[in-house]
Amino acid sequence: MKHWWWKLLGVLLLLGASVAALRVPLSPALVHVEPGRIAPGPVELTLTGYNTHFAQEGVKVFLENGGERLCATEVQVLSPTLVQARFDVPEGLRDHLSNVVVVDVTHGRLAIPGAVFTTGTGDGSGVESCAETLADAAPVKTFTFPNRNILYESIRNLCFHVPMWFAMIVLMAISVWKSVRALGSNDLDDDRAALHAVQVGLLFCGMGLVTGSIWARATWGTWWTNDVKLNGSAVTALIYLAYLVLRGSVQDPHKRARLAGIYNIFAFALLVMFLFVVPRLNAVDSLHPANGGNDGFGDLDLDDRLRTVFYPACMGWILMATWMYDLRLRAARLQERLER
Amino acid sequence: MAELRWPCRGNASTDRGRVRPTFAPVDFREIASLLRLELALDLRQRAAWGGMLLYVVSAVYVSFLAVKGGLGTATWNALYWIILLFAAFNALARSFQREEGGRQLYLYTLAHPRNVVLARALYNTVVMAVLSLLSLVCYLLFMGPEPLGGADVPQFLLAVVLGGTGMAAVLTLIAAIAARAGNGLGLMAILGFPIVLPMLLAVMRASKLALDGVAWSVNATYFGALLLLHLITITLAWLLFPYLWRD
């Protein structure tokens, strides 16, 4: 138990977090409103929900526009995920964009901000607010993931994509630490450790690129795009591939250890700057969360329930990566002893 | 060479195979004499400078023939940086290849490696500052100065010089590693390209913004980041070079 408790912990965390990340349902949300453009006069909106359970009774629908609320004159629940609402849209709404809101006892308040475009704006409609009839119902508490209108089910990828990069950074940091030691001690074993940390780190870099690419396809509509964060990750992969090429081109093991160690330290220091400092400059535009003045996941999407899965997933992947590195290093040591 | 003292002042000390470079304070007199040495060697080998300039002129002329004018500002800017990138690799790759065999050992006994790398980085910085401006003149001559019409010219020149010297700062240590690995320009391109790439993207953007004539405050972030990059890379080279130099 002394030496392998952390491996057991890693396996348990990884299994638990991965199952939870794939199985926990998304919270109910409105995903679509038809039509997207309305004009003053009678209007019929069809609202589509995801994971919703609208009951026949007690569903209220209203539009929010410039501080005013406009209630539906008639609401018809067609199915647990489909609601039809009729409105008498008055002249003179303040804003062009209206929020569509559904309130009922099961879900509380569900909304799509700025879902419909309204023509014929003015200084307010003057209709009587129906707010007092819509005391916000508390939703039923269940363990669900946030349902964001551009991410939907792909939010589960957070528990796979991000831990890959965390695991890679941890391995590269181990590698730099070993390289610093190798430069000081001239010990070839430290150099070997640095090499194997880089190799396992590159595996996680590759998995991070693949999961990120799939996610980008789902949310941004492209497998790859010109973005600081993406360029940074491509540069990371290139740097460590170059590290392997450098090792391959030097024959003398001590010289190889020194040259590779110097390149490793130099590259890692610049990498930290390119990956974590430059993308956060406000002068840089980025699609990626937490870059170029964007909000990170923590601000919008990472609620407490997702956190309870995300943090164990990170921990689990990091422990798994460290274990893989440990196994590879020990195998390499045995291999060398056999060859000697 | 009279100012360089002998023997082995401040070189790495060996204690049962452990290398411990001493943290001697930066010796400006030694750096000055090393710089004089670099300059004297380069003046003796004028062909080296001629080669660098001819490389730039050929690259610009090939682009001129291929493009036949009429470039938009963005492409004009990108093409200039691509030419300068390859010119930089070509110019800096030779910076450590002079030290072969005996010469390196001789220099090793005379000067502290940290002063050697500082002098070399400084010299490369000056070379790249001159080379980037000369390339710009040559580029303007062939490709036309139209994009400079709406530009903030001092800002653009600052971006050009900071970009060129930034490449020198980053590539000095890389050139040393590649030369020690005995695999000159080929290995240098592989090792250096991914490290230069993010800097190149930032400086391309900064110079594009300068060509569009934005206010200084907009570009200040980029210039700050580039100066920080200079500082970091030269510090790292200063720290790491003694380990590289030992055999």
Image (cartoon, coloured by chain):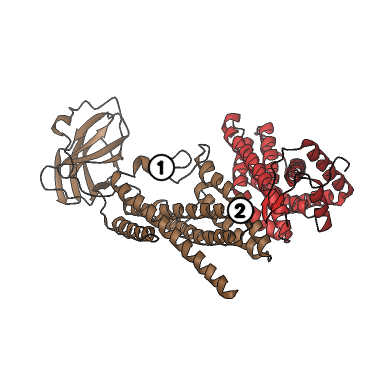
Secondary structure, mark 1, is loop
**Residue at the image point whose x is 47% and y is 59% from the top:** A204
* In the displayed structure image, the side of residue B37 where residue A328 appears, left or right: left
The answer to whether mark 1 and mark 2 are in CB contact below 8 A is no
- Asked whether the viewer can see residue B242, the reply is yes
Residue B204, position as x, y percentages in the image: 62, 43
* In the displayed structure image, the side of residue A166 where residue B183 appears, left or right: right
- Asked whether the viewer can see residue B132, the reply is no
- Chain coloured red in this rendering: B
Specify the label residue A233 is tagged with.
none
Specify the label residue A296 is tagged with.
1
Chain A appears in which tint? Answer: brown
Q: Residue furthest left?
A: A57
**Residue at the image point whose x is 37% and y is 42% from the top:** A298
Residue B77, position as x, y percentages in the image: 65, 44
Specify the label residue B194 is tagged with.
2
Q: Please identify the quadrant where the C terminus of chain B is shown.
A: bottom right
Residue type at mark 1 is Gly
**Residue at the image point whose x is 45% and y is 45% from the top:** A287
Q: Callout 2: residue from which chain?
A: B
Q: Nearer the viewer, residue A73 or A132?
A: A132
Residue A163, compared with residue A120, is above or below; it is below
Q: Nearer the viewer, residue A209 or A257?
A: A257
Residue type at mark 2 is Pro
Residue A121, compared with residue B48, is above or below; it is above
**Residue at the image point whose x is 87% and y is 44% from the top:** B40
Residue A80, position as x, y percentages in the image: 17, 52
Quarter location, residue A11: bottom left
- What distance separates the C-alpha of mark 1 from that of mark 2? 27 Å
Secondary structure, mark 2, is helix
Residue A65, position as x, y percentages in the image: 27, 32
Task: Give the total of numbered labels.
Answer: 2
